[in-house]
Amino acid sequence: MTAPDEPAREASLIYVIGRVDQGLRQAIRARLAPWALSVQQYTALSVLDRRPGLSNAQLARRALVTPQSMVEILSKLEQRGLVQRTADPDHALILRAELTREGRALLADVDPGIGAIQDAAFAGVPREEQDVALRAMTTAMNRLAEGLGG
Amino acid sequence: MTAPDEPAREASLIYVIGRVDQGLRQAIRARLAPWALSVQQYTALSVLDRRPGLSNAQLARRALVTPQSMVEILSKLEQRGLVQRTADPDHALILRAELTREGRALLADVDPGIGAIQDAAFAGVPREEQDVALRAMTTAMNRLAEGLGG
DNA sequence: CCAATTTCAGAGTAACTGATATCG
DNA sequence: CCGATATCAGTTACTCTGAAATTG
């Protein structure tokens, strides 16, 4: 059976999102391998690059994972010297994270390759439609972050 | 720090897809818990419902995972009596899978709840835009299945 | 012999639940 | 006391790589 499977007819949005994420993750993982960076480590780095000063709890809410999951990611980045954390002056309990110089340098090395993956995956889709998709997905992301209630 | 995080400004499509998938998975997992079904088990069931007769290898290509990963999912469904597999008459090596009556019954029980999750997540997005998003994501899925080359 | 399918075994990744300690 | 943060420990979910046997 070498015959290629026929393309799926009408799958649900929820299903297609899962497949795309799976394929994207694989591609990103391969691209990141030379730096021994995991997908979520890369994700955390790029979030911190755009929003320095987020705490572990804030990062976790943003990523839609538990704070315990984020601790693992963040602590490894810190051990590796890509991220540094300093206590908030007003709340000694809160550790605000930001990229180190090494972290920024590594991100600059890696970012183009990841961008290329996105471009390749959506090459067949017109800009305007990509924008519509991005808006739709962003809406869903925000609703999911609120627990599907609001 | 109880103040809600400001909504993300301009994240990349690739990033938002990852977050949405993560949020969706969590919601689906919770909804599936009473049946002790995992997310990928549910996914495999619904694919087989629409396309009976797919082999393990075909399912794996469709899901963008290795055949080894799919074996685990499929064999558990088979052990549980939700799926049955029969050898292809022409190729004794190929085992074609299909839902059992129990599998179809369980899927019928579960499906509405999963549909509700999708509806809730994309409630704020107009139909036409959901369709555009679905088309864009389907294009990306197919490109990823071809290895980003084609 | 080669290509495709299935599957076992081991490993690594990713995320979770539970519990503990601290701060305001 | 309560709510939020951080984090340790254990566990489950998910996927991969490697290797083997079988079929056409």
Image: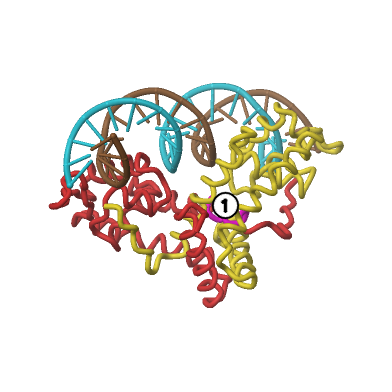
Chain colours: A red, B yellow, C cyan, D brown
For label 1, count other residues whose C-alpha is less than 10 Å away and answer few (under 14), some (14-19) or many (20+): many
Examine the rendered structure and indicate whether residue A134 appears above or below residue A109.
below
Report whether residue B72 is seen.
no
Where residue A14 sits in the image (x, y, percent)? 61, 55
Report whether residue B23 is seen.
yes
Where residue B15 sits in the image (x, y, percent)? 44, 59
Of A82 and A144, the residue lying toward us: A144
Left or right: residue A111 versus residue A93 is: right
Where residue D1 sits in the image (x, y, percent)? 28, 34
Left or right: residue A110 versus residue B133 is: left
User: In the picture, which quadrant includes the N terminus of chain A?
Assistant: top right
Residue A150 within the magenta-colored segment of the rendering: no
Q: Pinpoint the chain carrying mark 1.
A: A
**Farthest residue, direction right:** B89
Which quadrant holds residue A93? top left
Q: How many marks?
A: 1
Label 1: which secondary element:
helix
Of A146 and B107, the residue lying toward us: A146
Q: Main secondary structure of the magenta part?
A: helix
Task: Look at 55% across and 66% down and name the residue there.
Answer: B124
Name the amino acid, label 1: Gly
What's drawn in magenta, residue-wise?
Answer: A14-22
Of B23 and C4, the residue lying toward us: B23
Task: Look at 53% across and 77% down and name the residue there.
Answer: A128
According to the picture, the residue beneath numbered tag 1 turns out to be A18
